[in-house]
Image: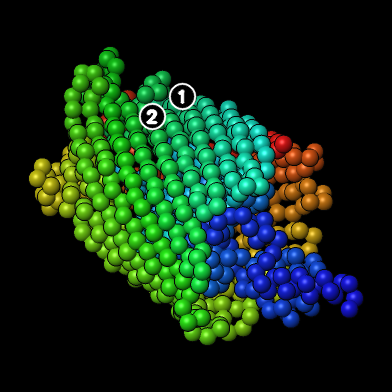
Amino acid sequence: MHPSQKIRWELALAWSLGFSPLQSECAGVPDESREGIQMPAPSVRTLAHLSLEELTAIKVDTVFGASKHEQNTTEAPAAVTIVTRDDIQKYGHRTLADVLNSVRGFYVTYDRAYSFIGVRGFNRPGDFGGRMLLMIDGHRLNDGIYDSAASDTDFPLDIDLIERVEVIRGPGSSLYGNNAFFGVINVITRKGRNLGGAELAGAYGTFDTWTGRVSYGQRFTNGVEFVVSGSLYDRAGDDRLSYPEFVAEDLDGGWARNVFASLSYKDFTLQGGFSRRQKDWPSAAYETVPNSHDPRLASMDERAWADLTFRHEFGDEWLVTARGYFDRYQYDADYPYDYDADPDTAPDLNRDLAVATSAGVELSVSKMFWNSHRLTAGGEWRHDFELLQQNWDVDPYENYMDSNESGDLFGLFLQDEWSIRKNLILNAGLRYDYFSAFGDSLNPRAGLIYSPWEPTAFKFLYGQAFRAPNAYELYYAGIGSIANPDLQPETVQSYEVVWEQRWGTQWRTGVSLFWNDVDDLINQATADVDGNPETLDDDLYQFVNTSSALARGVEFEVESRLPGGVRGLASYTFTDTEDENTGARLENSPQHLGKLNLTAPLWREKVFASLELQAMSERRTVAGEETDTCAVVNFTLFSRDLVKGLELSASIYNLFDQRYSHPVSADFTYIGPVTGKTIALDAVEQDGRCFRVKLQYRF
């Protein structure tokens, strides 16, 4: 046999067994956090007739989070996307929000204080992002007060520590319970072997933005593996932002500090982190008094977590995972108010404090039975020790709210993945959850995956999910607010059909048709002092289950991996949403969403140019107006190992200086300093053209 033919057969056999350069790179990642996308594995004979270049261009990936065990993504009961560390570097992504903005169907809204994740037309202003479950290495990250999924500088992990991001669309409550409403995002961290030493990184950008990071990771011959890292972020922000009746000068700044550590030995992994982030609010809110020289309108978020995981595969394919965890979240915010409407006196300072402390345990067991059924079962218990919410005036002191609740969650789940035939899989699961705050919830999921031919996969998916009312919605009773401990969870019934197709070795396409029917949406409505929403009082608000909504549409995606290292990814999402109470399109819901990502090597495999386009149609605001359509282009030059261990990048974001705005919630109101009237902002302008240069050195 000719040597080149022998190599092709060896590579073909390796691919068919599930090995690839990509998987080898991640071989040290625990199975719980391994993932992948898109392409079914071709047969050995098919691969043996391909060239070496064609073989190395094929991706054969696996995903863990869709079923809580490792599987080819074409066999997963969901539409899955993976963003790798290589993508993050080449496209110059600065935050998790940047990463998600590059993913089909996703869009992130920024109100200059926080970012909120939207998907497939659903990202209502005023929601806190609790309809997406966010995890780090399988550890739930949604906070205990607002259930928010942090994605901007409040995300507690430096983006350089991300190995890959696993995005799983569709309801996931049958496995994960609360918050897995429209999808699950699992951020996979880099391991000690991935670093293999020390790293120093620093960056500078527009608005006097500085970032820095020091990391060290290693794996020793005795099996001990660890990572420790610290990072900082400082930004002066836009020094002049104009709003009706006032100009915010030097009120757009913020800073963040993050620490992360992970220690593994054999079957045990101990992981934890701490983050603190402060952000000024230049656009004012909650009928506060804007002052162009008063920086007191600001908020601070603090997160800490620890997680001990045991994972072992016993004989007879018993896979057991046990986890114990602790979480703490704290929110502080200051709001200046002019109670006496006297321009000659300084505004009074009102303060919010919220603290959530919780601990819990999880257990899951997976085993193959009768060579065709993989059963996965498990449970979870969590206790919220502290759900503290306080609101008061600082000087003179006056207390408006002092609430401290506790709660418990208990959940059980069971899933069966039945390989009916070699090319036909039925995945069915069910989870029961009990919350001490409101009662129980039962959520099923089913998926039929059919591959009539090697490069083709059809998925017929159904699922139900829920979002439990969070502590803020249940118990907050500050100025102008009434608590509602009788809230019930939101629910969604989801239907989806997916067609994934590989065309040779260089092209892949995907089409998804989806229908999401949402009931018992939680909204803030006016009410009387007794909490009766039918007796309106414009000065009192309460969260209530009031409405239903539909979101239906189609997604298209095409990916190419061409000779010479050129890669392209384009997607389009059409979404039709409707508030079933009013018949109107949902607020902050773009009907058209387009993405284009291109990257190409300029010199060997050391210098790359990458371009991404993110286009969005108009969106309805809370005032009934519409934002303009927008198309934002980002461009990055990235180099690695021009000098051994050195990585450099230079990025221009919003290359053509597109002027555009994001819809914001009805809370963005302030007292006009000229007229003294309440002014409402329904949209906030985003940053224009800006740049960043970054350097990283490994030694």
Reply above or below: 129 against 417: above
Reply above or below: 99 against 256: below
Which residue of the protein is positioned furthest toward the right in this rendering?
Answer: 2
Q: CA distance from mark 1 to mark 2?
A: 14 Å
Question: Is there any visible trace of residue 80 in the rendered image?
Answer: no
Q: Position of residue 696 (x, y in %)?
A: 68, 37
- Residue that carries the numbered disc 2 in the rendered image: 298
Q: Earlier in the sequence, mark 1 or mark 2?
A: 1
Along the line of sight, the residue nearer the viewer: 359 or 495: 359
- Residue at 62 percent across and 62 percent down: it is 570
As shown in the figure, which amino acid type bears the numbered disc 1? Glu
Q: Which mark is residue 249?
A: 1
In the displayed structure image, the side of residue 87 where residue 469 appears, left or right:
left
- Image quadrant where residue 61 sits: bottom right
Q: Position of residue 202 (x, y in %)?
A: 64, 32
In the displayed structure image, the side of residue 542 where residue 442 appears, left or right:
right
Q: Which mark is residue 188?
A: none
- Quarter of the image with the C terminus in it: top right
- Image quadrant where residue 172 sits: bottom left
Q: Secondary structure at mark 1?
A: strand
In the displayed structure image, the side of residue 224 where residue 124 appears, left or right:
left
Q: Position of residue 564 (x, y in %)?
A: 80, 60
As shown in the figure, which amino acid type bears the numbered disc 2? Ala
- Residue at 28 percent across and 14 percent down: it is 344
Q: Secondary structure at mark 2?
A: strand
Circle 1 or circle 2, nearest the eye: 2
- Residue at 37 percent across and 70 percent down: it is 414
Q: How is the image coloured?
A: rainbow
In the displayed structure image, the side of residue 22 where residue 261 appears, left or right:
left
Reply above or below: 547 against 496: above
Q: Position of residue 283 (x, y in %)?
A: 40, 33
- Quarter of the image with the N terminus in it: bottom right
